[in-house]
Image (cartoon, helix red, strand yellow):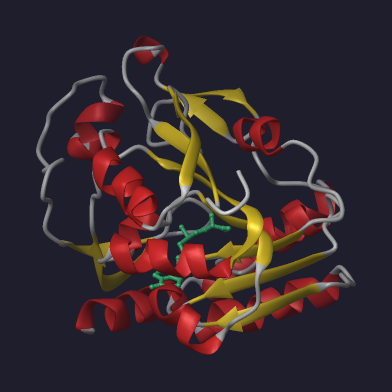
Amino acid sequence: MKEIEKNKIAWSLLAKDHYKHFKTLLTERNCLINENILNELGNIEGKSMIHLQCNTGADTISLARLGLSKIVGVDLSEENVFYANKLKDDFSLKNTSFIESDVLKLNTIHHDKYDIVFTSEGVLGWLPDLNKWAKVVKDLLTDDGYFYIYDSHPFLHVFDEESLAKGKLEPVYEYLNAKADLGYDIGGYACKTKHSENYWWNHSMSEIINALINQGLVIEYVNEFDTLFWNNGNMEEVKPGLFRYPDLKNKFPMSYSIKARNKINK
Ligand SMILES: C[S@@+](CC[C@H](N)C(=O)[O-])C[C@H]1O[C@@H](n2cnc3c(N)ncnc32)[C@H](O)[C@@H]1O
């Protein structure tokens, strides 16, 4: 698919900068996972996990350091996987490995099962087809395994970003039935943005939840937060790595999480 190929090129351009940025952070701090996620994940010691859309593996390494028995990161970009392996070697991590794959095709090349399928912070918008994605999630889970996602809220992406930074809510993008949004700049949260054609899809909450339900997964919870995991402009950092617009506390959701169990063993 043309759009996925363009996204692959766009993300690959950022790989080396992301590697350098996250190597510094992982030297200073043991774990880069934000508090919203850590509180919900709880104790994951001894579990096996697959981390979808892992970028250069910074969060994969943070999760590995929480005592997982095994973690596998997956990303579309060969460069991201190259630098993820480098980060793994820099920090001498055992039981951590990486796979290069389009997540939507992962179940055609990888057949292992995991206690936890994890994905977070800037993921679903890069995927054109959530029904295919949810099938991949289902196929990766052990019978009593669970899926966890923490991502930016689709309602946030309805508003113009520059207006939001000035405290104004200006709905310019579609929430329902949104088509691919063509962009030319990518990155910015961990390094300078780079100019490259890319495609992004705003999936509504019902689309996300129904894709999981249609695969027979049992939703344990859906949570919404008024904090975001990057500074969208003029936000205050309320907790490490979590930002809020000062005037929008409790006003609308910026991020969300979902936990869903594989149905077989409730
Ligand atoms: C915002 S980053 C996610 C970063 C993530 N929070 C982490 O763990 O560091 C989005 C990632 O999705 C990856 N990606 C985009 N489309 C993908 C696809 N179809 N299959 C697999 N990975 C994909 C990109 O290469 C990029 O690394």
Res. 230 in view? no
Q: Is residue 141 left or right of residue 152?
A: right
Q: Is residue 13 left or right of residue 70?
A: left
Total marks shown come to: 0
| Quarter-of-image position of residue 64 | bottom right
Residue 251 image position (x, y, % from top left): 32, 13
| Quarter-of-image position of residue 69 | bottom right
Q: Nearer the viewer, residue 57 or 231?
A: 57
Q: Nearer the viewer, residue 65 or 47?
A: 47
Query: Which residue is rendered at x = 73% and y = 77% of the image?
Result: 97
In the picture, the quarter occupied by the C terminus is top right
Q: Nearer the viewer, residue 111 or 122?
A: 111
Query: Which residue is rendered at x = 47% and y = 26% of the image?
Result: 227
In the picture, the quarter occupied by the N terminus is bottom left
Residue 75 image position (x, y, % from top left): 52, 74
Query: Which residue is rendered at x = 65% and y = 77% of the image?
Result: 112
Q: Is residue 2 left or right of residue 250?
A: left
Query: Which residue is rendered at x = 35% and y = 37% of the image?
Result: 153
